[in-house]
Amino acid sequence: MTKQGLAIALTAVVVGLFVLGASPLFIVDVTQNAIVVQLGKPVRNITEPGLYAKVPFVQEVTYFDKRLLDYDSSAQDVITQDKKTLLLDNFAKWKIIDPLKVYQNFQSQRGALQRLHDIIYSELRVELGRHELLEIVSSSRADIMRVVSKRANEKASVYGIEILDVRIKRADLPEQNEKAVFARMQAERERQAKQYRAEGAEEAQKIRSEAEKDREIILAQAYKESEELRGSGDAKAFRIYADAYRQDQKFFEFTRSMEAYRATFKDNNKTMLILSPDSEFLRYLKQR
């Protein structure tokens, strides 16, 4: 066969292989690693991008992503230390660091993802089972997830997988438990409200008692001072009367009688007086 005929024959073989989907060439993208497998055994581990050749029908190529990957699980039940059931939805960041190990263990990236799911869910159940519900949903969640991420990565590294971070996306109570939990929360809030109202009423009573005591003290003090002032005023008035009496006895008697008349004969005074014309009380009203 001439060289020209040989070239034509080779060209025909290559075209035929392309038509049958058995190209001897394959491309490894910059985002990929590739494992060349011959008769079920890996023979080449390709980590650099480029154009490569393989033996058609004998060798196959399995690709693995070298980028940082997302893992997002469906919601699953987890039981806490205080026997509460949580419907947990979590996600993780992971990557394939040894594609050869991954192929040897799982033959594909999909198989590695399933194993990843088992590892993360197992570690979540173990760690969350050591904590109560309140710690998981509030105070200790970040610390719990750091422990889960570390332990899950230790187990996954055996298979050529690195787990960088595991997080809880959502933690809900199962629907059948929500009403009971809400009822307990409502009862607890009502108990606290009653306690606050009772403490408020007790404090109000103390304040009222203190105010009443202060009021009585102030009134007593005011009465004492008023009596002292009245006594002092009466004493002063008596001294003035005494001085006036000593200066002019008749004039003093006259002014005192006028004051008595004024008080007795007021227009609104309904008192009836029956007195003798010779009464001493009327002596200044008699005609002279």
Image: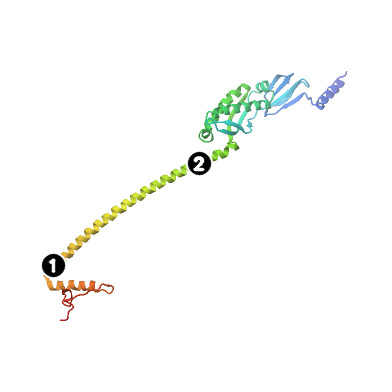
Q: Where is residue 150 in the image (x, y as percent from the top left)?
A: 56, 26
Q: Which mark is residue 206?
A: none
Disc 2 designates what residue? 187
Where is residue 86 drawn, in percent x and y? 58, 33
Q: In front of the other: label 1 or label 2?
A: 2
Q: In this view, does 122 lie to the left or right of 33?
A: left
**Residue at coordinates 60% horizontally, 23% vertically from top-left?**
157
Relative to residue 124, is residue 202 depicted above or below?
Answer: below
Q: Give coordinates of residue 212: x percent, y percent.
A: 33, 52
Query: Residue 218 is drawn in which quadrant?
Result: bottom left
Which corner quadrant of the image does residue 63 belong to?
A: top right
- Location of mark 1 (residue): 243
The quarter of the image holding the C terminus is bottom left
- Closer to the chain start, of discs 1 and 2, is 2
Neighbour class for label 1 at 10 Å: few (<14), some, many (≥20)? few
Q: In which quarter of the image is the N terminus?
A: top right
* Relative to 100, residue 196 above or below: below
- The structure residue drawn at horizontal position 72% and vertical position 21%, both measured from the top left corner, is 36
- Disc 1 to disc 2: CB gap under 8 Å: no
Asked whether 259 or 170 is in front, the reply is 259
Mark 1 residue element:
helix
Task: Determine the residue positioned at 16% across, 65% down.
Answer: 238
Of residues 217 and 3, which is closer to you in this image? Answer: 217
Q: Where is residue 191 in the image (x, y as percent from the top left)?
A: 47, 42
Residue type beneath disc 2: Ala
Snapshot colouring? rainbow
- Is 275 on the left or on the right of 57, as rendered? left
